[in-house]
Amino acid sequence: MNKLAIISAFLGGVRNRYMVYEEERVLEEKFRLASRIEGIAGLELCYPADFENPDLLKKLLSDHGLGVSSVNVRSRRTGKWWRGAFTSESAAERGEVVDDFKRALDLTGEIGVKRITTCPLNDGHDYAFEMNYIDAYRYAEETFAAICAYAGEVKVCIEYKWNDPRVRCLFASAGETAAFCQAVGVENLGATLDFGHSIQTGERPAQAAALLARAGRLFYIHLNDNDRNFDWDLMPGAFHFWEFIEFFYYLKELGYTHDWYAYDVMSKEIDTVETFNTVSGVTRRLEALADRIDRQEMARLMKQRNPAQTLGHLYRTLL
Amino acid sequence: MKTWRFCVNAGFFGRRRDRFTEYQPDRTLEEKFDLISRIEGIDGVELKYPVDLKDIGFAKKLLTDHGLACAAVNVDIKDAVHFRYGALSAKSADARARAVGMLREGMDAAADLGANLVSTCPLAEGYDYPFQIDYTDAWGHFIESVKAVASYRKDVKLALEYQPHEPHSRILLGNVGKILHLCAQVDVPNIGANLDIGHSFAALESPAESAALLAGKERLFYVHTNDNTGDGGDWDMISGTVHFWHWLELLYTLNQTGYAGWLGGDIAPKQFGPVDAFGTNTRMIRRMITLLERIGEDTLENLIQQDGNTAEIYDYLSKVLISGS
């Protein structure tokens, strides 16, 4: 069974461009909140914010008995790397990004974690003719190659996303990310499949998982949901009930089974602990529904490719 | 072609951030005016209430000193402290009273500043999940609250700015049809729309059609100019950078319907800053107007009056656009 983690940032300040729902919380408070949430075994830590005092971090992890699913290395910072971190036109800036990832990897090693993830949010564009795409891909290949070479045994995950804060991010889909990883050509570069990002970009997440796994690039999973219009980071299963069941069904088929799910869910105006209690409970219920599917029978039904039969079977046997 | 008046939304001249990044620092009202006065072709400012209007006398002085008119007062009723579960549509009578009170204060300020126009984007009225709110109750409260604002003083217009989503995945006042419904329910002449062009694209509309519908009911009070990719994100991009032909059609329609209000710039300055963002936005719109004059309003009108000639329309438009072709 996959363990459940929360990205630490979602236990801190909750805000968007219009509203501030929760003020920022200190690291100790984030850990205290995480410990109160049912079914949560760990955190996805954020670099640099959570690593200001590595000794305190280690103590908190030990005191609360929480694991770490991954370290999320922030590629966007206020005041710098504005026009992309991995794809900046400035070679000096790209060098600075690689150096910063090396520091993050050193600290990740200190806490014994074997995976970092990053969402290249600012690596994209707003306007036509804003960016030279050919150069941008080349810069990104060079930057990620340098990071991966230093990472060694540690897996490096790119969390693809269609947009926000840029109108178009460079890595929008599983296909673009898989192709990019294959172009870089190192084994420790892969994808974080964020369920909500996958939905927003027009994918069926189970299919995206299959594509990435076949390419050897399905490294990590984030769970949340949205209505396809935007990356709202809502509670899993609120919109895409059957897609979640199909997704969990496939993750077992693909062997993503003794790993982690990390949540990026915005609690917004709802209490943070209450939100994540529901989120973890709903996840386990959706998994249980997926597990009710008779795999032999489903395999037989899929061979027929007759959704009238398959949907009837699912409604008869699962609900 | 008619005379056009351009203003800017002062909200974009202060601190700008999204959920990920802070792009622009906080600025004082003097600093905002200093930046605005550096933009060519701007005659007015949409000021935010309460943040820009804590001292109305001072705001008046800055307007006079810079030779700018107050185009509208934009009342902010969407903070998560008082309006966490809605403002005009909230279940809480206190929250509703507070929102109505703020809009009335905004109306007084607008009258004092000679704008006689209040704009507000009711973004606290919305929801994320199925089964989260009672739609009948929420709409009932919303309509009653808007009535309470409108009846306060008839000499000031209230322009409601619709937007399909953000910060909630659904906003009650999400499209042109809903605002026309609201106006019909409230049924007083001083309630209308602030047609934000990007919001209209985000709501999957053709803004020219929305403008025509609103103008037909005398509900088009104000226009926010910007653009986006029509994929759901309200990116507040420079007008015409994505939807060039739609923008041209919008300007043609505004002219045809006799729109007499302001064109209010509403552009994300991101990392390049508000002076460049709003300067280019204004020049792009002015150049599109020049292009429309070159196209010829009468010629275009004659072409549109015929059926089945879409190819001919675009052949003509592109021939005028690209000289020598």
Image (cartoon, coloured by chain):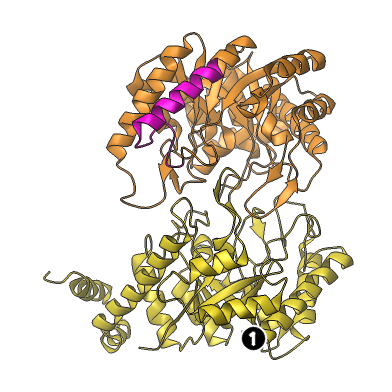
Total tally of numbered discs in the picture: 1
* Along the viewing direction, whichever of A295 and A46 lies nearer the viewer: A46
Give the magenta-colored segment's residue range: A82-105
Which chain does yellow denote in the image?
Answer: B
What percent of the width, then of the height, locates residue B135? Answer: 76, 63
Q: Is residue A208 left or right of residue B316?
A: right
Farthest residue, direction left: B324
* Along the viewing direction, whichever of A22 and B218 lies nearer the viewer: A22
What percent of the width, then of the height, locates residue A248? Answer: 62, 26
Q: In this view, does A313 lie to the left or right of B32?
A: right
Query: SS class of the residue under badge 1?
Result: loop
Q: Which chain carries label 1?
A: B
Q: Please, is residue B315 above or below residue B260 in the view? A: above
Q: Can residue A112 be seen in this view?
A: no
Q: Please, is residue A222 above or below residue B283 in the view? A: above
Q: In this view, does A16 lie to the left or right of B1?
A: right
* Along the viewing direction, whichever of B215 and A74 lies nearer the viewer: A74
What percent of the width, then of the height, locates residue A1? Answer: 69, 16
Location of residue A188 by image quarter: top left
The residue singled out by tag 1 in the image is B116
Could you tell me which residue is drawn at 35 percent across and 21 percent down? A184
For label 1, count other residues whose C-alpha is less than 10 Å away and answer few (under 14), some (14-19) or many (20+). Answer: many
Q: Please, is residue B251 above or below residue A208 in the view? A: below
Location of residue B27 by image quarter: bottom right
Q: Which amino acid does label 1 sit on?
A: Asn
Magenta: main secondary structure equals helix
Q: Chain A is drawn in which colour?
A: orange
What percent of the width, then of the height, locates residue A246? Answer: 59, 30
Q: Is residue A49 visible?
A: yes
Q: Quadrant of the image for the C terminus of chain A?
A: top right
Q: Is residue A84 magenta?
A: yes
